[in-house]
Amino acid sequence: MVCVPFVSKAGGTHAADDPIEQDRRDLRQGVSINTLGYLLKLSVPIMMVFVVRSYGVRAFGLFVLTQAVLLFVARVCIVGLDKALLWWIPRQPKGCELNGWSSSIVSVGVLSAMTAIGMTAFTRPVATWLGGATEVATPLRIMAAALVPMTLLEMLLAACMGRKRMEPNVLIKDTVLPIATVGFALLLVPLRLGSTGLGLAFLAAYVCACALAWAWWRQLFHDAKDPSPHRLLPPDSMLQYAFPMWLSEMSNAFLLRMDTYAVTTLGDLQLVGIYGSVTTMANTIRQIRRSFDPIVFVITAEIGAQAASERLREGFSYATYLVTATQLPVLAFMVAFAKWLMPLFGDGFDAGTTAVIILCVFWVTNSALSLAGIVVSAYGHARVAFFNVLFVIVVEGIALWFLVPLYGIDGAAVAVGIAYSLQGIAQVVQMRLLTGSWNYTRRVAWPLGIGSLAAGFAGLVWMIVPDPHALIWRATAFAVFVLVYGAGMIVVTVRYEPRPTRVRASLGNPR
């Protein structure tokens, strides 16, 4: 049995479904799964409060720093093959989706195992490289053992998402993994292990998550085969795509932790711990946008193989609409309650309140733009994605250099926001040049317009109440936002959302 990439240029449909409506169903399913995941993850910030209070802000700061190093190393070991699977699997004929799988998973497993052994043997030099933070050595040695399950988890989840199944990623990586990490950490509190206990919790959580992902992968791919299970390396075309994606992902992994590294240079591990809590809170908004990446990537890769520009415009706009509509209520919640949420972590954490709001606002703004980068990558332009990351590294590095010494963690938040916003603008322009269209329809503006109206009503309430800083009045303003926003979105959905039977008719007048 020989498998070849699917390269059909026909604009046909699969089965009897209209492909545009099928894309909408896939995206709506993604929203439903994400909503379930976020409901489950509501416990994570609460549990994290107890973790920080139990272990102390310094031990938590050590954990944040060590985790930042290890996540970058994991990206190096994966060599871009997880992203290559997202592009590769949708292009394979039915039954041959595992073409190149065996060689890919074995290569990543061997690389990560060798790297883990090396890091265990040389933890002291690594700690010295981190600015002489010798306290990092012990948790780093323990957490290095997690490299193998970390990398295998990414590969298994990427394969599942290649079949347009977001459930494993949302429920395992985004839900089970963080809950298990804080859960194991709380179970180890009585042993008083400090940062070592956090490292052990990190390792145990990844082992559990990897085992669950493997079981899910087996169920999804029970009908697929790898026609060349004994080959040493993945197919050449897969490697050609993976290499620039590897450079991009490795650079992106470094980029994602640049702000943490910059805050570390201030020489205060307590401040690193506070900033770790800031990013944890702000990432509740960012993760909504990032959780759409795999499904948008897979749909767009399929569209790119069929040259279906109308389908791209409809699907891309619908994805942007869903992301923005989901993020805005979370942003309103953060603006209203960040002042009370941050001090829950402990004394001094109120210093992160402004940084949380800054990051949340930037992430919502960036989300309406940065999905364009997924289109660029899914159309096979992995090298462009790599240069986009380099661009952000340069911009953010310069901004961090100037702003962190002056404004501390608030400056770090501003630097991150500016860099990613400029990248988003660049990605929209790249998408326009690549596809010949901006790919935005009027639908994209609905959440922004309704959200602005709701924010205006909430702001008016905030202005006329006796004490705008009191919790009860902030809660009242937030309730007003939810009511106005919810009512507006219901009206838009009922009146303007196209029905499956009207999809073809609506193509000439996209909303």
Image: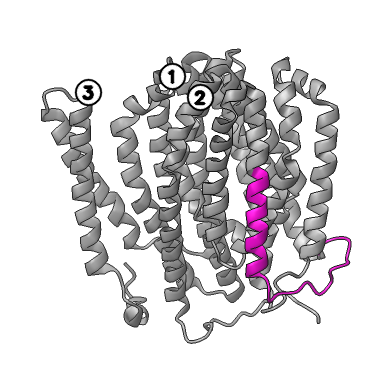
Instruction: Work out how far the residue at label 1 is from the one at label 2, CA to CA, in angstroms.
Output: 8 Å
Question: Which of the 4 quarters of the picture holds residue 82?
Answer: bottom right
Mark 1–mark 3 distance (CA, rounded to whole Å)? 20 Å
Image coordinates for residue 247, horizontal then vertical, percent = 72, 45
Residue appearing at x 88%, y 66% in the figure:
231
Mark carried by residue 346? 1
Give percent across and percent down for residue 167: 53, 60
In the image, residue 111 lies at what x, y percent? 82, 46
Q: Residue at x 63, y 69 (%)?
A: 220
**Mark 1: amino acid:** Gly
Please tell me which residue is depicted at 30% across the width and 50% down the height of the picture.
448
Query: Residue 197: x and y, percent?
Result: 64, 27
Answer with mark 3 or mark 2, whichever residue precedes in sequence.
2
Q: Name above or below for residue 43 compared with residue 340.
A: below
Question: Which residue in the protein does label 2 denote?
Answer: 52
Q: Nearer the viewer, mark 1 or mark 3?
A: 1
432 sits left or right of 222 in the view: left
Question: Quick check: is 418 in the magenta stretch?
Answer: no
Left or right, 111 with reference to 301: right
The residue identified by callout 3 is 469
Residue span colored magenta: 206-234
Secondary structure beneath disc 1? loop
Report the residue that reaches farthest toward the front: 190
